[in-house]
Image (cartoon, rainbow, N blue to C red):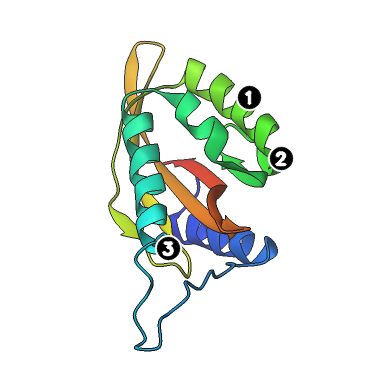
Amino acid sequence: MRTWRTIILLAVTAFFMSGGPTLTVAPRSAAGQVHSEQSDPEREARELLLGAKDALSSGNIRYLRPHLGQKVYLNLFTGINGYYSGEQAFLILESLFSTYQPISFSFSSRNFSIRNPYGFGPLTYEHRGKRETAEMFLSLANVRGKWVINQITIATR
């Protein structure tokens, strides 16, 4: 059984192994104001994380497919651990969630800042007619101006 310290260590290690965050700076006017026609990276990160939370809560795994990066780090309680292409990661998650059907997911901790957006919290799922809970961690990376999911960790309690 993994402890919280191990989960956090794995998450931080994967984050830095992936090259860390890529910052996107919005152009500013002479007065220092961000131009309103430019998108707000923090708002986009928040929308993606909240969309993923809502999708997982309703069992809509397909929502994740277009939001997975080209390289996604998975660390799952089933023993899957490593970097996968976005498509491979989706197929692995689809298979996982067909066996461990998500019932709800919420954030107990989250950060929407453009430096390192993430969400972390309990994932309740059903497996063989029994409800169980795991801890799920999602982090984002900004790749060429677009937020993508670059890490998913799911550990049993």
Q: Nearer the viewer, residue 2 or 78?
A: 78
> Viewed as shown, does residue 24 lie left or right of 89?
left
Q: Which quarter of the figure has residue 89?
A: top right
Query: As displayed, is residue 12 above or below residue 65?
Result: below
Q: Nearer the viewer, residue 57 or 143?
A: 143
Among the two numbered marks 3 and 1 on one chain, the one whose residue lies closer to the N terminus = 3
Taking the spot 55% from the left edge, 22% from the top edge, the residue there is: 94
Three-letter amino acid code at the position of disc 2: Tyr
> Viewed as shown, does residue 49 lie left or right of 21?
left
Q: Which residue is mark 1?
A: 91
Query: As displayed, is residue 156 above or below residue 49?
Result: above
As measured in the structure, the alpha-carbon distance from the residue carrying label 2 to the one carrying label 3 is 32 Å
As measured in the structure, the alpha-carbon distance from the residue carrying label 3 to the one carrying label 1 is 34 Å
Three-letter amino acid code at the position of disc 1: Leu
Q: Nearer the viewer, residue 131 or 105?
A: 105
Q: Position of residue 150 (x, y in %)?
A: 58, 50
Q: Position of residue 114 (x, y in %)?
A: 44, 67
Q: Is residue 77 visible?
A: no
Q: Is residue 44 visible?
A: yes
Taking the spot 34% from the left edge, 88% from the top edge, the residue there is: 31
> Residue 38 has which mark?
3
Three-letter amino acid code at the position of disc 3: Gln
Q: Residues within 10 Å of mark 2 (few under 14, many from 20)?
A: some
Taking the spot 50% from the left edge, 73% from the top edge, the residue there is: 25
**Secondary-structure class at tag 2:** strand
Q: Position of residue 55 (x, y in %)?
A: 37, 30
**Secondary-structure class at tag 1:** helix
> Residue 84 has which mark?
2
